[in-house]
Image (cartoon, rainbow, N blue to C red):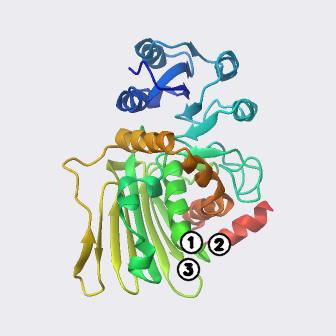
């Protein structure tokens, strides 16, 4: 494991231990784990031994004894908001593989910092729009012209991340490209007999259609039981059709002619690669941390769209994200 680099503390639950180990291995020399928090289980004890770092089931103790530059939470279960505030006061950057809380679209309990709100500065990794594919594309929205339809897929396994985490990343991406839909019509297929009230309980394959104001649509497919890990985005505009994966992109005109493309890597990135790449990018470019918390879509709107998906899956009817916002105000 890493013997030098930025000092970080990690909070993990047993299902994410292997993922965290893979991420830290990829960042050897860039980060050094100085504390591992999580429940007293064999998986986490073994990981702490490999990392040769202190391990506690009390995150506050780790934070107090030795503040870290970054706190990476592989799971939000067991975290206390007071501990997160302490970390921020100590100058620690909060990074998460899962959303922090899911109480409502606004206020301190919302996931991450909303514009004009009081949310915790909580950055979810890996963000699609900080990935290799999107950042390689030059002025993608200018290339496609006015956006008419956006389609995004994010699928993988539950040991990588939850369905909620995928939905948050999908809607954050879509709301960067298009306005909030007037209605969302969603379906959840999977092992659940009933759609749960708690967003963190969502599991399976969700598909959704969002109707944009005026004309246009967003289409999503997200799953935590979806086979191989993959994320992809398609933008259909007046002058072009852009396709973006985690690793590459290609742009065609409306007649199908190839206008531009990046080289596809020999091997497709797996989920641990995506997390490590995003984390490394935030380390190498600290300005991205400021930009990520100060710009982009209002996270209250992101959460409202996720909540509309959950409710629509439950009622079988189109639901309004705006109504979710009004109910929370």
Outermost residue toward the left?
266
Residue 158 visible in the shown view: no
Return the residue at label 2: 320
Q: What residue is drawn where x is 53% and y is 62%?
A: 171
Q: Residues within 10 Å of mark 2 (few under 14, many from 20)?
A: many
**Left or right of residue 95, residue 22 in this image:** left
Which of the image's four quarters has the N terminus?
A: top left
Q: What residue is drawn where x is 71% and y is 59%?
A: 115
Mark closer to the observer (2, 3): 3
**Left or right of residue 296, residue 207 in this image:** left
Q: Secondary structure at mark 2?
A: loop
Return the residue at label 1: 184
| Front-lying residue, 50 or 66 | 66
| Front-lying residue, 164 or 131 | 131
Give the x, y percent position of residue 79. Answer: 66, 31
Cα–Cα span, label 2 and label 3: 11 Å
N-terminal-most mark, 2 or 3: 3
Q: Is residue 135 above or below residue 24?
A: below
Outermost residue toward the right?
329
Return the residue at label 3: 212
Q: What residue is drawn where x is 46% and y is 47%?
A: 126
Cα–Cα span, label 1 and label 3: 9 Å
Quarter holding residue 207: bottom left
Q: Residues within 10 Å of mark 1 (few under 14, many from 20)?
A: many
Cα–Cα span, label 1 and label 2: 6 Å
Which of the image's four quarters has the C terminus?
A: bottom right
Q: Is residue 67 above or below residue 189?
A: above
Q: Is residue 242 above or below residue 280?
A: below
């Amino acid at each position: 494991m890493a013997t030098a680099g930025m000092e970080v503390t990690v909070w993990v639950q047993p299902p994410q231990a292997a993922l965290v180990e893979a991420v830290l291995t990829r960042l050897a020399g860039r980060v050094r784990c100085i504390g591992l928090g999580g429940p007293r289980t064999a998986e986490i004890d073994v990981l702490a031994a490999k990392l040769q770092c202190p391990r506690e089931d009390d995150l506050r103790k780790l934070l107090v004894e030795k503040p870290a530059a970054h706190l990476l939470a592989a799971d939000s279960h067991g975290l206390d908001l007071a501990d997160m505030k302490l970390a921020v006061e100590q100058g620690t950057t909060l990074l998460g593989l899962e959303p922090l809380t899911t109480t409502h679209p606004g206020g301190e309990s919302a996931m991450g910092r909303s514009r004009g709100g009081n949310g915790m500065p909580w950055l979810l990794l890996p963000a699609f729009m900080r990935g290799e594919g999107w950042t390689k594309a030059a002025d993608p929205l200018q290339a496609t012209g006015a956006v008419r339809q956006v389609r995004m897929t994010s699928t993988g396994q539950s040991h990588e991340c939850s369905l909620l985490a995928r939905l948050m990343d999908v809607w954050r991406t879509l709301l960067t490209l298009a306005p909030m839909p007037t209605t969302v019509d969603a379906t959840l297929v999977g092992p659940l007999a009933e759609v749960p009230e708690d967003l963190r309980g969502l599991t399976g394959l969700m598909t959704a259609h969002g109707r944009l104001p005026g004309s246009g649509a967003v289409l999503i497919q997200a799953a935590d039981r979806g086979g191989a890990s993959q994320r992809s985005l398609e933008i259909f505009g007046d002058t072009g059709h852009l396709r973006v994966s985690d690793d590459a992109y290609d742009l065609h005109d409306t007649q199908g002619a190839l206008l531009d493309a990046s080289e596809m890597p020999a091997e497709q990135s797996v989920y641990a690669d995506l997390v490590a790449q995003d984390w490394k990018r935030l380390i190498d470019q600290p300005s991205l941390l400021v930009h990520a918390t100060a710009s982009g879509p209002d996270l209250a709107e992101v959460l409202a769209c996720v909540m509309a998906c959950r409710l629509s899956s439950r009622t079988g009817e189109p639901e309004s994200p705006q109504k979710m916002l009004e109910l929370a105000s």
